Image (cartoon, rainbow, N blue to C red):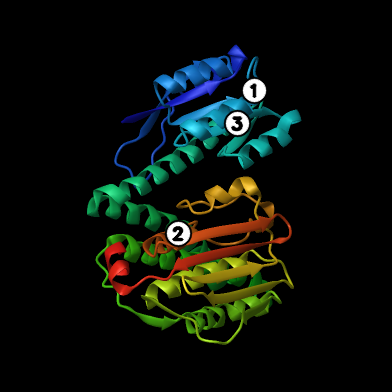
Amino acid sequence: MEVIDILVVDDEPGIRSGVTRILRNFTVSYPFLEDDIGFNVIEASTGEEAIEIISKSTPAIALLDNKLPGIQGVEVLQFINSNHPEILVMMITSYASLDLAVKATNIGAYDFVPKPFTPQELKSSIENITKHYFLRRMTRKLHREGKQVRFQFLTVLSHELKAPLNAIEGYLRMMQEKQAGESIDSYMEFIDRSLSRIQSMRTLIMDLLDLTHIESGKRQRTLREIDLTLVARSAIETMTPLAIQRDISLTLDGTESVVMLADSDDMEILFNNLISNAVKYNRQGGWVKCSISKTTDSVEVRVSDSGIGIESNDIPKLFQEFSRIKNPLCKNVTGSGLGLSIVKRIADMYSATIKVDSQAGVGSTFTVKFPTINSASLNDGI
């Protein structure tokens, strides 16, 4: 059994001892791991003591109280973000301080648990954050260890497909047995839910295929002069049905060809992800605009939208694997959390830069700027 360290930072001895008691014999297990996971709880009563412990031995998870004597919990969180970003932080907060806890999640905390909490509430929260910890760890190992870890990664994602498949099967059986009556109208909600889950699975599978192609290093890339305007138009046509459903205007500024030396599959993946996100995270009746321009030393792709926008503190998280920004406005939006990390990988291969300008509630603009390079240097980079 693997044991991971959890640091509990709270000035109330009862909270610390309660967490220790609840987690002492608690274990979690996942289908993608051979062994169960147990927990070693380390206690700290002040923020200063927590920083000292973290500096000597980095825990996997920190349960951090908002209100502490001396330096506050938010200051400890900022120290962790700056010096040990691999630590996952869960804030412990009173109901009276929920606004502060939400703020903490916006600046890097994974989640928060209000107190007083029941043993089951704490165990459920720990199970969720531990799963995220191992998924993130496996993603990092994927870059280093090759085929075996890739197999484990596929196992994780296949596990994530089971829940929507089970739901769809349940709805179909209810329809087969006519549990809601004889009228097809009685089953429209079941059909809508099933279609939503199918779309979620399709997105996950396609993002996995894209990521696998990019990271394998074995896919033969064909570098040639391609017209980015045609690639963008194809991506727009793909997303048009969804845009029509949500009354979103989807346009490409300009019709002139913009030619760049690149692999067509890479550019198709990049445009599909940027435009797809702009539509999915938009508002009813909104708009999405894509533009492509070229100078003597660069090619610039810009995708703007009138969507929900992104808080400035969340922008650095956008390009991390399995990262999905917590926003109540997009809780029903399906996604794998891989799309923008794939965009970043492609941009890196072409020595391109990505700039994000966004305002919450107003919209976002993603700008990818490719340097003009010759085929020899591009082959060296890839």
> Residue shown at 45%/23% (left/top)?
54
Gap between marks 1 and 3, in whole Å? Answer: 12 Å
Gap between marks 2 and 1, in whole Å? Answer: 35 Å
Upstream in sequence: badge 2 or badge 1: 1
Residue bearing mark 1:
72
Q: Quadrant of residue 186?
A: bottom right
User: 202 or 212, which lies in front?
Assistant: 212
The x and y percentages for residue 82 are 51, 33
CB-based contact (under 8 Å), mark 2 and mark 3: no
Q: Is residue 159 above or below residue 72?
A: below
CB-based contact (under 8 Å), mark 2 and mark 1: no
User: 298 or 96, which lies in front?
Assistant: 298
Residue bearing mark 3:
91
Q: Is residue 191 above or below residue 113?
A: below
User: 201 or 222, which lies in front?
Assistant: 222
Instruction: Name the image quarter holding the N terminus.
Output: top left
| Label 3 element class | strand
Upstream in sequence: badge 2 or badge 3: 3
Mark 2 or 3: the one toward you: 2
